C-alpha cells in the first residue's frame, strides 16, 4: 500500500515538473525591448516626466528595459545594442558621427519614438532631422491648457486600447507636415475648444526603412500620468520595435 502511494506521488510529481517545462517552452517569455531614452534641454522637467514616469510606464510588466541618458554624446556607443531610440530631448546633438548613426539606425529598419520636445524645430544646423525623420515639426504652440485629442485611425497598433477621444492639459503643438519631407500618417489630432484649427498629435512618419512614431503630447504630469498617454507610449515602442 505504501509503495503504491509512493509511486503515485512520484508520477504526479514528474508530470507536474515536465508539464510545467513543456508549458514554459511552448510559451517562451518575450525578451524585453531594449530602449535608449534621451532627454535633456530646456522648458521641461526631463528627469521627472521622462526619466521617472516614462521609464516606469515602459518597464511595467517587463515590456522594455530602458536606459535613460541626458548626455547626447553617449548615444553613438549605445545604438548597436538597442531596439528603439526614444528621443525626448531638445538639447543639441552636435556630433556629426552621432547624427549619421541615428540615420543609419533608421535605415537598418530600427525603431524611433520622437517625443514632444523632439518634434520642435530645435536644430537649424541639422535640417535633415526634421525633414526626413520627423516629416515636419512645430515652431509654436497654444498657451498651456485643455484640449481634445481625437483618434483618427482606430485600427493602427499604436492606437489599440486608446479611447476614441480624450481631454488633457498640455501644450497644443502646431505640428505641421513639411511638403518636401517624409510623408506622415496621422493617427490622432488635437483641437482646442476655442479654435477651429486641428493639428496632428500622433503620427507615423513613413520613413522608407525605419519605424518612426511621433507623439506631440507630453509637457508635464497632465500627459505622462494619464492612461491614454501611457497606452500610446507602450504601443508606440512595441510597434517601433516590430513586436
Image (cartoon, rainbow, N blue to C red):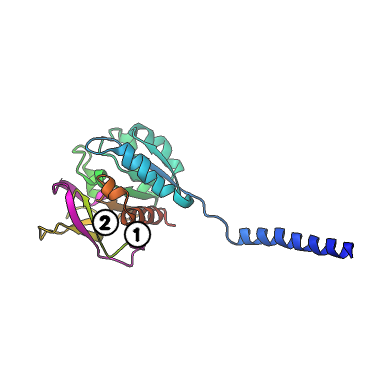
Q: Is residue 196 inside the magenta stretch? A: no
Residue 74 is left or right of residue 149, and the answer is right
Residue 199 place in picture, x, y as percent = 17, 57
Residue 96 placement (x, y as % from top left): 30, 35
Q: Disc 2 versus disc 1: distance between alpha carbons?
A: 9 Å
Relative placement, left or right, of 5 versus 227 is: right
Circles 2 and 1, Cβ within 8 Å, touching? The answer is: yes
Q: Residue 68, position in %: x, y?
A: 39, 38
Rendered residue at 44%/57% (across/down): 243
Residue 165: name its quadrant: bottom left
N-term-proximal mark, 2 vs 1: 1
Is 9 left or right of 167, judged from the image as shown?
right
Residue at 37% x, 41% y is 52
Q: Nearer the viewer, residue 180 or 214?
A: 214
Residue 63 visible (yes or no): no
In terms of secondary structure, where does tag 1 sit?
helix
Residue 35 to residue 189: above or below = above
- Which label number is shown at residue 158? 1
Q: Is residue 143 magenta?
A: yes
Q: Which quadrant of the figure contains the N terminus?
A: bottom right
Residue 202: which disc?
2
**Circle 2: element type:** strand
Toward which corner of the image does residue 11 lie, by quadrant?
Answer: bottom right
- Judging depth in this view, the residue of 33 and 226 nearest the camera is 226
Which residue is the extreme one toward the bottom? 155
Classify mark 2: residues with Cα within 10 Å, few (<14), some (14-19) or many (20+): many
Q: Which residues are magenta?
A: 133-161
For this rendering, which residue is in front, 158 or 169? 169
Please determine whether, in this image, residue 75 is positioned above or below residue 141. above
Q: Please tell me how crowded label 1 is: few (under 14), some (14-19), or many (20+) other residues with Cα within 10 Å.
A: many
Residue 169 seen in this snapshot: yes
Label annotation for residue 55: none
Amino acid at each position: 500500500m505504501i509503495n503504491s502511494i509512493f509511486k503515485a506521488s512520484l508520477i504526479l510529481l514528474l508530470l507536474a515538473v515536465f508539464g510545467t517545462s513543456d508549458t514554459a517552452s511552448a510559451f517562451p517569455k518575450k525578451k524585453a525591448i531594449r530602449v535608449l531614452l534621451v532627454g535633456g534641454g530646456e522648458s521641461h522637467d526631463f528627469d521627472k516626466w521622462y526619466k521617472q514616469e516614462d521609464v516606469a510606464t515602459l518597464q511595467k510588466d517587463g515590456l522594455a528595459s530602458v536606459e535613460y541618458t541626458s548626455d547626447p554624446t553617449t548615444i553613438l556607443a549605445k545604438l548597436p545594442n538597442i531596439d528603439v531610440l526614444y528621443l525626448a530631448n531638445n538639447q543639441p546633438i552636435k556630433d556629426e558621427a552621432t547624427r549619421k548613426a541615428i540615420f543609419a539606425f533608421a535605415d537598418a529598419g530600427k525603431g524611433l519614438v520622437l517625443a514632444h520636445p523632439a518634434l520642435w524645430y530645435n536644430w537649424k544646423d541639422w535640417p535633415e532631422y526634421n525633414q526626413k525623420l520627423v516629416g515636419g515639426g512645430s515652431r509654436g504652440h497654444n498657451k498651456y491648457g485643455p484640449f481634445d485629442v481625437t483618434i483618427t485611425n482606430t485600427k493602427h497598433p499604436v492606437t489599440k486600447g486608446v479611447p476614441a477621444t480624450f481631454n488633457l492639459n498640455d501644450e497644443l503643438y502646431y505640428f505641421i507636415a513639411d511638403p518636401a519631407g517624409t510623408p506622415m500618417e496621422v493617427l490622432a489630432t488635437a483641437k482646442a475648444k476655442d479654435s477651429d484649427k486641428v493639428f496632428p498629435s500622433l503620427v507615423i512618419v513613413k520613413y522608407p526603412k525605419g519605424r518612426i512614431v511621433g507623439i506631440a503630447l507630453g509637457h508635464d504630469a497632465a500627459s505622462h500620468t494619464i492612461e491614454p498617454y501611457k497606452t500610446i507610449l507602450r504601443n508606440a515602442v512595441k510597434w517601433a520595435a516590430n513586436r
